[in-house]
Image (spheres, rainbow, N blue to C red):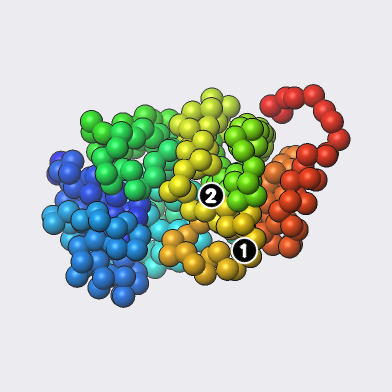
Amino acid sequence: MSDRITILGAGSWGIANANLLAENGADILMWEFDPDELALIKEKREHPDKLPEIPINESISLTGDLAEAVAGADIVIFAVPTQKTSGVCRQLANSGGRPDLIVNLSKGIEQGTLRRVSQIIADDWAGIDSESIVTLSGPSHAEEVARHLPTTVVVAGAETKSRKAQEIYSNPVFRVYRSTDLIGVELAGALKNVIAIAAGIAQGLGFGDNTQGALITRGLVEISRLAQVMGADPETLVGLSGVGDLIATCISRHSRNQYVGYHIGQGQTLDQVLAGMVMVAEGVTTCRSARELADRHKVDMPITRAVCRVLFENLPAREAVNKLMTRPLKAEARQ
């Protein structure tokens, strides 16, 4: 592979992507904004807190200089949290680099603006062609990708660009499908994190498999309602970035969002849970954004609303479950 690839963000998913692409033969430069984090991974050649016991491939270069990172890059991959993406893009607006392909890995909705990540990049990185942006999503925990466990995802965007991303990523343990439904893939990836918090709360309260099955199923209904109103293809929502990622995130011990919910179900406050985390749980901020989008589009999302009340309005988790279970009876329907 002759492409020079820059990865913005050296967290667990950034490192897992860097290693995967380096093993595929790419020339990788990884950027980290935090000087202490950068010094740590340069010294250790791994991140002991975010992705322990996974060495960073020796061929991967590291930098803290953003302008250097994108200068001359053919492909730029965003592995920074959603709420940090705009700030990075605004810094990049003054850089000379304009890559041929941009791959977004983040799964969230920006607070306030309610923008999807591809929209943030297109709006705030001046001079970028929006058609060059794709999003890669699906059931893909960094801890498992880093250990070469078989993983299958989808990349969405313009056909030529998604095909390019599909080609650079795919190998015998990482299979990539492609899609043109960028809206659906991004919304499904963001909204499932809110349902994963709900699933974690249920686990923390000691509820069983029946509850998990219900939350995942009815959560998918909520995701589908909002995403389709916003232009998503219904088929996307029952694919890898929809139901596939939803299941993995709700049931996995690797899920940051499930972790947040579990500890809240165990009686901790949101502030207490977040204070003990070294990585970002995107569903916490996405929850409010999802509720705002539901209001804007007049979509019924009772699980999402209940999670917001538990996280931000001090509604006891057990009371939230009771309110969900005792709503007016109705027929089952996806819509």
Pointer 1: what residue?
268
Tell which residue pokes out farthest to the bottom in this image. 36
Q: Is 327 placed left or right of 32 in the picture?
A: right
Kind of residue at disc 1: Gln
Q: Nearer the viewer, residue 127 or 188?
A: 188
Instruction: Assign the N terminus to one quadrant of the image.
Output: top left
Whichever of labels 2 and 1 marks the residue nearer the N terminus, that label is: 2
Residue type highlighted by circle 2? Gln
In terms of secondary structure, where does tag 2 sit?
helix
Question: Which residue is at the front of the view, 180 or 270?
Answer: 270
The foreground one among 20 and 71 is: 20
Q: Does 80 appear above or below 151?
A: below
Which residue is situated farthest in the front direction here?
206
Q: Quadrant of residue 224?
A: top right
- Closest to the observer: 153 or 249? 249
What secondary structure is marked by label 1?
Answer: loop
The percent position of residue 166, horizontal first and vertical second, equals 30, 34
Q: Is residue 274 visible?
A: yes
Mark 1 closeness class: few <14, some 14–19, many ≥20 residues within 10 Å: some
* Residue lying at 51% horizontally and 56% vertically, measured from the top left: 281
Q: Which residue is mark 2?
A: 258
Q: Is residue 102 visible?
A: no
Number of the front mark, 2 or 1? 1
Q: Residue at x 39, y 45 (%)?
A: 141
- Within the image, what quadrant is residue 299 found in? top right
